[in-house]
Amino acid sequence: MTEFLQQLINGLALGAIYALIALGYTMVYGVLRFINFAHGDVFMLGAFAGYYLSPVVNKFLPAQSYVGGALVLVLAMAICALLGVVIEFLAYRPLRSRPKLTVLITAIGVSLFIEYTCQHKSVFGAAPHKFPDLIPATTINFNGLVIGVNQIIVLVTTAVLLVALRFIVQKTRMGTAMRAVSFNEPAAALMGVNINSVISFTFGLGSALAGAGGILFAMNYASIDPLMGVQTGLKAFVAAVLGGIGNLPGAALGGLILGLLETFAGGIPGVSNYRDGIAFAILILILLLKPAGLLGKSTVEKV
Amino acid sequence: MKIWPAHFFAAVATSFILTGCNQSSTPGAGGTIKVGEFASLTGKDATFGISSHEGTLMAIEEINADGGVLGKKLELLTEDTQCKAGESATVVNKLISRDNVIAILGEVASSRSLEAAPICQQNKVPMISPSSTNPDVTKTGDYIFRVCFIDPFQGTVMANFASGTLKAKRVAVFTDVKSDYSKGLAKFFKERFKANGGEIVVELDYNGGDKDFKAQLTSIKAANPDGVFVPGYYTEAALICVQAKQLGLNVPLLGGDGWEASTLVEIGGDAVNGNYFSTHYHQSVGTPISKKFNENYAKRWNGKTPDTMAACGYDSALVLADAIKRAGTTDGPKLRDAIAATKTFPAVTGTITINENRDASKSAVILKVEAGKFKYLETIQP
Amino acid sequence: MNSGAKRFLIAAILVAAVVSAFSAQFNRYYLGVVIDIGINVILAVSLNLINGHTGQFSLGHAGFMAVGAYAAAKISIVFSDKIPAQLAPVLFVAALLSGGLLAALSGLAVGVPTLRLRGDYLAIVTLGFGEIIRVVLQNMESVGAASGLKNIPHDTNLFWAWAFAAITVFVVTSIVNSTYGRGFIAVHDDEIAASSIGVNPVRYKVTAFVFGAFFAGIAGGLYAHHKQFLSPTGFDFLKSIDIVMMVILGGMGRTAGVIVAAVLLTLLPEFLRGFAEYRMILYSLLIIVLMILRPQGLFNFKNPWRAKA
């Protein structure tokens, strides 16, 4: 029983991270209908931003303090938001009127460019770096169950961000504009919505989420390298699709399910070697039953 | 716009012809001996490939500073395999056919060495792998050598250490299912440990590149072992140590030479203390060369501490240079015979003798991590 | 058109045969790259049938390739010393075809259940199938598992690679340009309109997957007998992405463009070798720039039959 509960905790903590990154994927997809392949790399840049910011912040705030940690998180999110806006402006905007698959290739190009540039020895280098402890690394023991403070923070942050995003999308002016663009771009433009600023904002927001994901991920798994976004980004993408891409609560749900699946599959001897395959197999099963994801609305196409 | 593709085609064709012509070289011309190296300089294993390359390059530079071999300087031509399947074959073909190298050094990963080995064998160009431990690599043919251990030796060493020195009876094995190195070590460890009367309580797997190991470690903890054998690379081993401690799995973790790197301690922090791993050498008992190596390496590469891959990369170049000197020629078959005849050659990772399987036979040492330092425990003869 | 295509096929095979006869004079490196090009052309053109012509976004092509590669390699390894040497080419072709058929079967297995899915959902499911194939291979001891499958006979030469590339191009263009094949484009352009005029989208989608997977399997077999070594990590989703790039860069559904893109994307990294550590940075930059300059695909020109991609 203890083992089962511990795995449940492990799975939820892992799933919360997937969920957090999946939220950013789904945001961008919801508005633009295209997979931002570079999202995982922005996630990695977020972690590295934290790596370089932390010593700077520690100069005027005590090391391993919650205030300092929060400041690093916010700064890294701001940097990633800026990066997201720049990437969109340079690589995606010129192709906005083109089929989405065309943009997919530039997105892959951007992703490869970031990865190879960061692997270069004069940037970050290929070797893993130790991510500094932003907050004291404590764990809570409860009847043999172990949960890290970091893990609780991830769960809470994901929940808070999910609510905040719901609020932005549903209640604010910008959110209304985002939904309008998502629903019908030309019509939204005719209604006076500034498409460019809405899309820039969406990218900024999505990338800030990726940055937050990077920092929280690195707090839990203190080894960061330029390719850390590849596998995690793929998993988060799978989570977003699982929940119904474009749907915020769906991304969170998809992330948690994927985390739990991977954890329970990973803990069984003789099954753990098929862990990645099992996650995909169950994903396929779910999609075969619900072709638009768990919470996605399946639309009937009309002529 | 219609003219554009034609221009483009012309440009592509011209550049193809140009690259084809101006770089084709003749062997022996220019007064250097060309040595080819293929390494994973970008991609997921880049950190190992770069280490190995830095070791190899430093050895070549030192040999040249001492006047080179046969009165000529060595010229190292390095190609990146990008950690991609298929690339090794392409680049080794390029090094041999276009650049006319006299020998090939590389790779870290056995899967990429296995891809290159048939090409070297067919062209009768000797190949020395610095750190591919899969026994099959050198079985490809009589031109393929290596300067590192093979999986059976190291797996057996750690099994004997676990049952002998640690007196462990119940051990869990935690393998990287993507890595043949890890699977090889695990296989031979299990065989020997069971033969020693021990019990493997649970076997679990991870995928190289994973960051979360809590699922498997929770299961391992539930099986209540005396120790856990984690053959794999330091990139994952460090995080495994940290997460094992977090989950309260307080038994020693055992590893192989893939653990040896300063990064292990940097990332793992206190959590790696009290764990053991086997490797090639330790400063305190090494050859005179190995004592100098760490110092020179730090000087050459901005204060970096060498890992095993760097040391093996260095040795692969030393063994090659020594063989060229003894052969007195760079002719393929003669050079091959000279490499095969390498006996008690003092290198960084120990005293290397190439055995009849073209593998390096050398002793292993077992180190313990204590207070963030690697402490020498014992030496095990092959 | 059809006789023109036949003439092209015969001409291409003849050229391949003639060039191949002199292949001993070529530098092995260039020869290897030219064979790589042939294999990539097969992969790109076959994926183009699924992605470009039929509009089904598949990210699992590397998986089909892996099935064909491992099946063909295993057959060659098991039977190569049991048959007389003069039958070796027969065995090789038989191995390739069996690999192709097995891949086609897996294409059927992927195609049928995923018919309900569209767009990104289909992409994820095909990606998932590809990854499952890789994970299964990684655990299959009979094909070497993580250590890979070695000692594959070196049977692929320039002739086989280019002959099969020509056959692939011929078959795919013939299918698409036939009366029957117009249905692929109808499904691509508008599924509902297509079914309302009596084109059965289900049958077309499955056909595209089966044919696409068959040729991917052939390409895999050629690859196996070219590199002489297979490891499961070579068939991960990044390999699928590579092939997708060729299709999109070439202009979805434009066979000629896709061929050129396959050639270009195989040669580009080789040309950039001189840039050493900056090579892949330049490569990715070039992809972005090419895409922005030629978003409709590199060699996408007016096609009398299709006004819009």
Image (cartoon, rainbow, N blue to C red):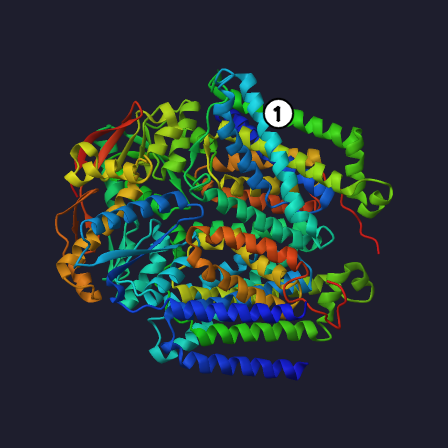
Q: Is residue C292 above or below residue B161?
A: below
Q: Quadrant of residue C244?
A: bottom right
Q: Secondary structure at mark 1?
A: helix
Which amino acid does the dot numbered 1 rest on? Thr
Residue A24 spot, x, y in % from top left:
65, 36
According to the picture, the residue beneath numbered tag 1 turns out to be A157
Taking C196 as reference, is A271 above or below it? above
Look at the image and tell me in which quarter the N terminus of chain B lies. Answer: bottom right
Would residue C174 be found to the left or right of residue A10 on screen?
A: right
* Closer to us: C220 or A289: C220
C28 or B156: nearer the viewer: C28
Q: How many marks?
A: 1
Instruction: Determine whether, in the image, residue C243 is placed left or right of residue C183.
Output: left
User: Which quadrant would the C terminus of chain B be assigned to in this image?
Assistant: top left
Is residue A243 visible in the rendered image? The answer is no
Query: Residue B146: x percent and y percent?
Result: 25, 52
B21 sits left or right of B333 in the view: right
